[in-house]
């Protein structure tokens, strides 16, 4: 995850939510987003 830029991480998260990928994968992305203190600006079901 450290190799992803903040923008790439957020894009990946938004795309994963949009495509309804596995919840575990979305949770992993969201954990990294929180670790970096980023804001998703999304109405995700995981919030």
Image (cartoon, rainbow, N blue to C red):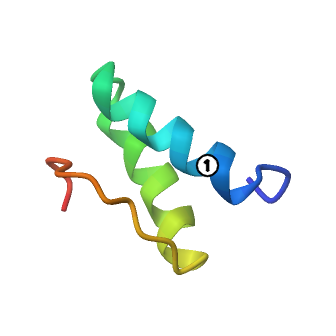
Q: What residue appears at the point 80 percent right and 59 percent down from the top-left corner?
A: 2
Q: Residue 12 at what x, y percent from top left?
A: 54, 37
Badge 1 density bin: few <14, some 14–19, many ≥20, Cα 10 Å: many
The residue that appears at 18% across and 62% down in the rendered structure is 47
18 horizontally vs 1: left or right: left
| In the image, farthest residue toward the right | 3
Judged from the image, the secondary structure of the residue bearing numbered disc 1 is helix
- Residue 40's image quarter? bottom left
Identified at 47% across, 65% down, the residue is: 31
* Residue at image coords 20%, 48%: 44
Residue 6, given in percent of the width and then of the height, sits at 67, 59
Percent of width and height locating residue 19 = 33, 19
Residue under label 1: 9
Q: Is residue 13 positioned above or below 2 on the image?
A: above
Along the viewing direction, whichever of 46 and 9 lies nearer the viewer: 9
**Image position, residue 17 (x, y; %):** 31, 33
In the image, is 25 to the left or to the right of 8?
left
- Left or right side of 42 for 22: right
């Amino acid at each position: 995850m450290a190799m992803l830029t903040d923008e790439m991480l957020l894009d990946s998260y938004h795309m994963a939510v949009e495509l309804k990928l596995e919840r575990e994968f979305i949770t992993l992305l969201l954990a990294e987003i929180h670790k970096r203190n980023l804001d998703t600006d999304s109405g995700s079901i995981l919030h």
